[in-house]
Image (tube, coloured by chain):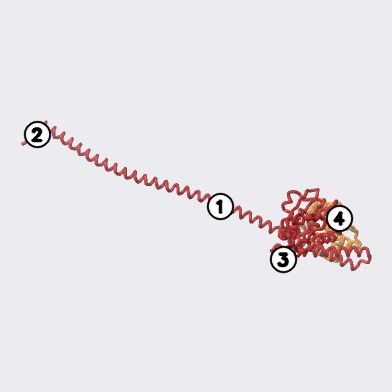
Chain colours: A red, B orange
Amino acid sequence: MIELTTETSGFLLLFVIVASLAVAMLVLNLWRKRVEQQSLSHQRELTKAIKLIRKKELEAVKHTKELEKTKSALLNMMEDLTDSYEKLKELDDLKSDFVISVSHELRTPLTSIILGFELLEKEKNPVKQKEIWELLIRNTQRLQRTINDILKFSAMDSGKVVFRKKQFDLKKVLQNVVAEEKQRIKTGVEFNLLVSSIPLVIGDEEWIHRAVTNLVDNAIKYTNKGQITISAKRQKSYIVVSVMDSGTGIPKKFLPHVFNKFVKPEKQKVGAGVGLWLTKQTIEKHGGRIWIESKKGKGTHVSFTLPIKVKK
Amino acid sequence: MKILLVEDEPDEARSMQLVLSGEGYEVILAGDGKEALDKLAYADLIVLDIILPRLNGDVVLKEMKKRGINKPVVVVTAVSREVGVEQDLKNIKKDLVFLQKPFSSADLIVAVKSKLQ
């Protein structure tokens, strides 16, 4: 029998304590290792998650940039559409104005014609009779011209014009225009024709005649004093025709638009606004060019060219 | 009876003048709105073309209203009545008579006589 002395119990206690500590340390160590491993695994997962978030972030930025681009493109498209709509509306308004102008242009000479015939029935005075006759003839011609213009415009506008081109004498056309327009000149205005000998040109004589008449009509309308000069001369392989007047001229801001469809000077009620447009189309479709110079208060100068067809 | 004829187209003015003077009226001519306003005082009735250079017919009517001038007016228009110009003008002067171009001399005389009764 081992007698438990105080010394032995002391050593036993120490042993138990040390053993307990050792076990505790072992357990702690194991636990620490486990925690460490868990921590490492968590870290790895965290790193993976961060990488994924970064990737998603970049993708989001890329998408935002694409959205911005799309938004920009859409805004541009909207702007273009608004522009087109406004231009169409403007043209539509001009067309409505055109219809009203045409209506006015037809009804005005008709009024004079109807009243003229009724007056002629009752008028006994030969001087007054002559006056009424001339009024009737003038307005019949005006009506005829307006209808012709509308038909020409319609044909040109829809692209259905067929020119009857053959060789003709431009000088003769100019002389005819002068003869026809002479009576419409305002008193005190000089009317000159300066044409030397020029070669024949090829084109539709009727259309060219109308084009020149239109230019002369405008000159007459806007010239109250001074002169209107029509000239034509050969310049290399073209004939240059010019209609120059000392009239009221065209304001600078208006010049770029004079050849547009339906455009009329403000407050001008006479005319449908298609004369200059028709003239330009006619000249250009004949291979020529047309241009205009004008100064408000000084006068206007319209020139156009027509190619000379050289006979082989 | 004096009629002020406000019309800027010379042939129309002349033919209307001949019709009216043929009926015994004295006709005063005005070629635009401004001239019309200057000559208003002399007339018993105004025949007014609604589209004029310088001052449109409606401006003439407004100015007449402003000045308290209540003379009868026959409005002559080439613009179709459907365009709705009529109501705007009637809003300025209630008792307007409208003549749509083209009209006959009988139409013109009837319109003028109806307002001078």
The amino acid type, in three-letter code, at marker 3 is Val
Farthest left residue in view: A1
Residue B73 at x, y percent in the picture: 83, 58
Dot 3: chain letter: A
The amino acid beneath tag 4 is Lys
Amino acid beneath label 1? Ala
Q: Quadrant of residue A123?
A: bottom right
Q: Is mark 4 on a helix, strand or loop?
A: loop
Relative vertical location of residue A113 with respect to residue A28 in this rendering, above or below: below
Three-letter amino acid code at disc 2?
Answer: Leu
Residue A299 in view (yes/no): yes
Instruction: Using the image as rendered, state which of residue A27 and residue A12 is in the foreground.
Output: A27
The residue singled out by tag 2 in the image is A4
Closer to viewer: mark 1 or mark 3:
3
Query: Is there one chain holding both mark 2 and mark 4?
Result: yes
> Mark 4 = which residue?
A186
Q: Quadrant of residue A140?
A: bottom right
Kindly identify which numbered label has been placed on residue A73.
1
